Amino acid sequence: MSGQQHEVTFRFMAQPTDVNFGGKVHGGMVMKWIDQAGYACAVGWSGAYCVTAAVSGIQFVKPILIGDLVSVRAKLIHTGSSSMQMAVDVLARDLRTGDERLATSCVMVFVALDKPDGKPTPVPPWTPRDDNERRLQEKALHLLELSKSMEQLVDMRGGGND
């Protein structure tokens, strides 16, 4: 049922198979988790197959260690006609101490399609319900403007091929 689920949280423990040679979860694994949670949220909102169109401002703030309880939270912050922007936070909790920290955050854009190899399809509009959601939507709109400016800059440079 579309237009109902605007937030998704995945929770699991960081495993030894998730870490790099330094003993910390590697960025590629974190990005996979982000994409999965964002996708689940986008499909939950749109009721359609979705594709990742962009990931912006990814920041690796603190490391995730083996045995940490990981929470990947994707939250809808803006809808276009067929696109959805999600704020995604990755939190890590040390189960022994209970200390929780922000490990990674970013904003993702998904586009709903009418079928896996199809065309963009409309998504239900989302309306912020409180001041915090309004602030997040304002940031999402600002990020869209920045993204369009970057696209124009790349186009002026000939697609980035110097």
Image: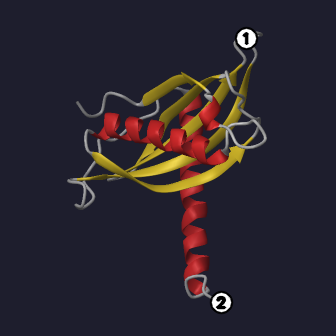
Q: Residues within 10 Å of mark 1 (few under 14, many from 20)?
A: few
Which amino acid, mark 1? Gly
At which x and y percent is residue 143?
Answer: 59, 54
Q: Which is more toward the observer, 65 or 48? A: 65
User: In this picture, is 8 found above or below 94?
Assistant: below
Give the quarter of the image for residue 19. top right
User: In this picture, is 124 found above or below 147?
Assistant: above
* Badge 1 element: loop
In this picture, residue 136 sits left or right of residue 4:
right
The residue wearing badge 2 is 162
The residue wearing badge 1 is 98
Total numbered labels placed on residues in the image: 2
Q: Which is more toward the observer, 40 or 86? A: 40
User: In this picture, is 124 found above or below 55?
Assistant: above
Classify the position of the C terminus by image quarter. bottom right
Please tell me which of labels 1 and 2 falls first in the chain.
1
At which x and y percent is residue 103?
Answer: 70, 34
Name the residue rendered at 54%, 67% in the picture.
148
Asked if one can make out residue 55 in the rendered structure from this viewpoint, the answer is yes
